Image: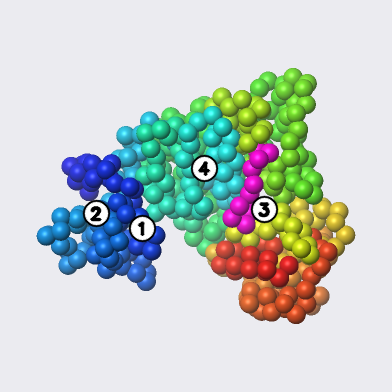
Amino acid sequence: MSQLRIKTLYQIFLSSKGVSTDTRSIAEGQIFFALKGPSFNGNQYASHALELGAMLVVIDEPEFYDDSSGKYFLVDNCLSALQDLATFHRQQSKAKILAITGSNGKTTTKELIGAVLKTSYNVNYTKGNLNNHIGVPLTLLELTNETQFGIIEMGANHIGEIKDLCEIAQPDFGLITNVGSAHLEGFGSLEGVKQGKGELYDYLRNTEGLIFINSDVPSLSEMLTNYQNVYAYSQGNNFAKGTRIEIHEQSSGLKVVVDPEGENQAILVQLFGMYNATNILAAINVGHYFGVQLDNLLLALSNYVPANKRSQVMNTKSNTVIMDAYNANPTSMGKAIEAFCKLKDKSKIVILGDMFELGPDSIMLHKQIVDYLQANFVGDCVLVGENFCEVAPKEFDVFQTTDDCLDHFAKSPIYDSTILVKGSRGMKLERVLDFL
């Protein structure tokens, strides 16, 4: 879209109540972008959006254009128009943009950093999991004149996606949580994952942006060479010379001990599993870099309550449930099981669902999870999904579908147990909570 057209659309945007891509949730005074998908065409809903109170509809199919209304804006491609508008808005904003990506932990890290920075700044950050080519522009378009920081989560399952998202968001700062065996079907290999996630580093090198890096993670250091504008941190070397942060696992969460010049300060963060320690470290160090006072920083972390079924410790009437069923890949599932194995609770049960998008190695990677359970876990194992069905031993309870698993628990309830629930988003394993 030409600069003149972008500026014209932008002036309309400034007088609007924001943008929407879905007539089911559109608000009066918003601009409707008629996006397309495999099973829908937003152009067909343009007139309906106006009936619902949209002030303008952006379409890319001329047959839906209505000259008489003055409320149609015709473009070559609605998605590109949305992205161009978001980038132009970002360029007008005084907000600093921090981009976060990684194979695991990026959403939790985003939320922790957001909670910390909000104690001292006006912050806007990615809602839920809106971290793709549509979600990133929508987040950018929520920046206001008051916004001082925008925290943009970036997800990807193919090489080139992070590069594109960086061009849209134009971050000033960046952080990669880790790289692991996620979305192998799209990236092709672990090296492909490194290349794809490393596109954030590439962008910041080219623009001389600042990179936050956890030096405890060797793969990240390997990806970042010959670049000096780096803020490195680890458990032993944090935001001030001589400051040490220790993180200890407890049944109720993670105990964080900060020892600034010998004055111990300890808090409890409501997150399960030592694999979340790196996410907490990131929040502490990013917050301190931007001048958040230590007391405010620790208070924000202690008040943080995980949502979206990510590492949540939930007490039901009958059991303690560690709900980590928002998504899963071999790395995150392995770490969750490892942490669960260390719990001293008497009666423990794992309920695991299939991991998706793993490509030709999918069965082998599911088999590795099963082998680890057999060798290390003491308790009952419940596996759900076609991949786990192929590799599960006879002593495990195995179900082809989540519905089959729910039927089982309806007939055979569980009591007085600590239960880990973990699986890919498509398995919808959070539904088992009603039966636990």
Looking at the image, is mark 2 or mark 3 earlier in the sequence? 2
User: Residue tagged by mark 3?
Assistant: 311
Q: CA distance from mark 1 to mark 2?
A: 12 Å
Residue drawn where x is 44% and y is 48% of the image: 162
Q: Amino acid at mark 3?
A: Ser
Callout 1: few (<14), some (14-19), or many (20+) C-alpha neighbours within 10 Å? Answer: some
* Residue 100, disc: 4
* Secondary structure under the numbered disc 2 in the rendered image: strand
Looking at the image, is mark 2 or mark 4 earlier in the sequence? 2
Q: Determine the image quadrant of residue 221.
A: top right
- Nearer the camera: disc 2 or disc 3: 2
* Secondary structure under the numbered disc 4 in the rendered image: strand
Q: CA distance from mark 3 to mark 4?
A: 19 Å
Residue drawn where x is 66% and y is 79% of the image: 404
Q: Amino acid at mark 4?
A: Ile
* Residue 56, disc: 2
Q: CA distance from mark 2 to mark 3?
A: 41 Å
In this image, 310 relative to 161: left or right? right
As drawn, 423 above or below 4: below
Q: Nearer the viewer, residue 115 or 242?
A: 115
